[in-house]
Image (spheres, coloured by chain):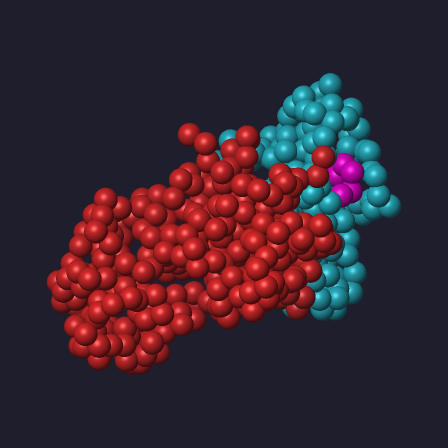
Chain colours: A red, B cyan
């Protein structure tokens, strides 16, 4: 089967979604990221791999955190970084995506990090760039956010190395979450045996069981004996119509409180992709509690993004 | 060609290394073979000198000059440098010295940890063929080898070293190391 993410030698050419990536590639990325964790602790927090290369962050949709972590990752690899906030720029003057991209290629950009509100935007760009250019999907619509999925499994592997023995719960707005889809694909590929999703019926995609997960509509049942609790952000900006009564009511039923967390295994870790809505999907006592690994996720996110860029950026010269 | 016993070469290297150990000396092994050798040398030094010697491990995959051609070596091993590099006398330990490019990459990485007082290089075998103004300071043996061959250092489960020669492409720029 043709996979636009891999080249003829089966090596990673673009990172567009975790779906369809072989376990070998996921493990390569995670193992490589291990090497980059230590770089941030040295006197010089940089390695020269992407020296002389230009990385373009093209954000058709706002995201301060994701853009910042990609920017730091590229700079720690010694790349030059160009940040384009397209929502406030040429697109509002009527330029097409490909014209924007072709202009950047004419400026000798080497790598694109793309976020777009439409699913498939990064795929579309990847299909139209010359072979020496790599595209990284930094979130497209409801479809995928592969580096977030990767950093989540990297964080889990750090705290719970026995992936084949884990029970993981993903909680909240699965329907609007590209993060949840990427997490589920990554966990499944890496052999996590039990993945649960806990959400109200209105916030679950209709075909969610096909992803190989167990569905729960009740926190007390779903959290029982899990090793990892992955919270999702309630995505008010993506909701149309009345999917939820109110955010207070959501917290009453699906918010992660210390009492509910106590139902999970005593050494369970709590994750959140950020930005957090405190008091909506997660209680502050949990977010700042000793089981929370939410800030380590951010730190590891830089190492994982460095690994992806370093793997994509090498081996292109003749 | 009859190959020497690498255990004897290691003994020869140890005799050159021991007089160079000072208070501020640290050993740094270069993955993979150099780490095995560093650990063997370290173990003996510590027992003969009766004190701990700081030591680290480097891979330098992120500093190699063939990244653009060959990409990142994804099986790289994490660097371990659990000491302050500043003002230390660093002795790098590698198995095979060939072009000098690995040593250059390792030195670049080393200097991103701080400013050492000095850097020396100890290798089990210098096979000749340096392409840079870098040479080992301590050598187990000088054993020239043609460009289409490479030395392979292996270690068995008892920790005993074994040396062999493999046919290789001219691109390979150092002896491969394998566990057996």
Q: Name the residue located 32 percent from the left edge and 79 percent from the top edge.
A: A278
The extreme right residue here reads B133
Is B115 located above or below residue A139 in the figure?
Answer: below
Q: Position of residue B65 (x, y in %)?
A: 73, 45
Q: Say which residue appears at 71% left-offset and 50% top-offset.
A: A106
Tell me if I can see residue A17 in this picture.
yes
Specify whether residue A153 is in view: no
- Quarter of the image containing the C terminus of chain A? top right
Q: Residue furthest top?
A: B1
- Of helix, strand and loop, which mostly describes the magenta segment? loop
Residue reaching furthest front? A94
Give whichever of B12, A93 is nearer the camera. Answer: A93
Magenta stretch contains residue B99: yes
Q: Quadrant of residue A252?
A: bottom left
Residue B20 in the image: state x and y as whole percent: 76, 56
In-image side of A264 versus B80 (left or right): left
Residue B93 on image: x %, y %: 69, 48
Total numbered labels placed on residues in the image: 0
Q: Position of residue A133 (x, y in %)?
A: 62, 45
Q: Nearer the viewer, residue B146 or A157?
A: A157
Q: Residue at x 54, y 47 (%)?
A: A125
User: In this rendering, would A122 be left or right of B54?
Assistant: left
Q: Nearer the viewer, residue A140 or A147?
A: A140
Q: Is residue B20 magenta?
A: no
Where residue A189 sits, quadrant-wise, is top left
Query: In the picture, which quadrant includes the N terminus of chain A?
Result: top left
Looking at the rendering, the stretch of residues picked out in magenta corresponds to B97-101
Q: Residue at x 48, y 46 (%)?
A: A123
């Amino acid at each position: 089967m043709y996979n636009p993410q891999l080249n003829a030698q089966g090596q990673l050419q673009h990172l567009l979604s975790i779906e369809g990536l072989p376990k070998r590639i996921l493990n390569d990325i995670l193992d490589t990221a291990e090497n980059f964790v230590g770089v941030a602790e040295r006197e010089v927090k940089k390695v020269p791999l992407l020296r002389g290369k230009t990385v373009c962050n093209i954000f058709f949709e706002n995201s301060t955190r994701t853009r910042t972590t990609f920017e730091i990752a590229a700079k720690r690899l010694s790349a030059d970084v160009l940040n384009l906030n397209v929502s406030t720029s040429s697109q509002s003057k009527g330029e097409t995506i490909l014209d924007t991209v072709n202009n950047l290629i004419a400026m000798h950009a080497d790598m694109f990090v793309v976020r777009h509100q439409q699913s498939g935007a990064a795929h579309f760009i990847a299909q139209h760039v010359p072979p020496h250019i790599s595209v990284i999907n930094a979130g497209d619509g409801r479809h995928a956010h592969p580096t977030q999925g990767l950093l989540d499994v990297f964080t889990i592997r750090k705290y719970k190395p026995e992936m084949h023995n884990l029970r993981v719960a993903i909680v909240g707005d699965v329907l609007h979450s590209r993060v949840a889809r990427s997490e589920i694909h990554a966990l499944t590929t890496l052999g996590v045996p039990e993945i649960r999703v806990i959400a109200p019926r209105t916030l679950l995609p209709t075909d969610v069981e096909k992803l190989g997960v167990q569905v729960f509509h009740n926190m007390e049942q779903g959290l029982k004996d899990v090793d990892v609790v992955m919270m999702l952000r309630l995505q008010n900006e993506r909701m149309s119509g009345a999917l939820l009564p109110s955010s207070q009511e959501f917290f009453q039923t699906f918010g992660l409180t210390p009492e509910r967390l106590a139902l999970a295994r005593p050494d369970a870790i709590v994750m959140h992709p950020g930005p957090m809505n405190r008091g909506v999907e997660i209680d502050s006592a949990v977010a700042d509690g000793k089981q929370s690994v939410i800030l380590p996720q951010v730190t590891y996110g830089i190492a994982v993004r460095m690994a992806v860029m370093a793997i994509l950026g090498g081996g292109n010269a003749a | 060609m009859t190959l020497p016993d690498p255990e004897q070469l290691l003994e020869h290297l140890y005799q050159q290394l021991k007089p160079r150990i000072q208070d501020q000396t640290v050993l740094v092994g270069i993955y993979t073979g150099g780490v095995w050798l560093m650990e063997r040398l370290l173990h003996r030094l510590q027992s003969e000198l009766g004190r701990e010697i700081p030591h680290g491990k480097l891979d330098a995959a992120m500093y190699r000059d063939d990244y653009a051609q060959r990409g990142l070596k994804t099986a790289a091993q994490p660097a371990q440098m659990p000491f302050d590099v500043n003002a230390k006398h660093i002795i790098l330990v590698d198995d095979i010295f060939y072009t000098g490019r690995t040593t250059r990459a390792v030195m670049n990485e080393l200097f991103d940890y701080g400013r050492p007082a000095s850097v020396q290089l100890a290798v089990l075998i210098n096979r000749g063929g340096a392409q840079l103004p870098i040479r080992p300071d301590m050598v187990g043996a000088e054993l020239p080898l043609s460009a289409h061959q490479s030395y392979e250092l292996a270690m068995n489960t008892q920790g005993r070293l074994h040396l062999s020669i493999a046919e290789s492409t001219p691109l390979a720029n150092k002896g491969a190391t394998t566990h057996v």
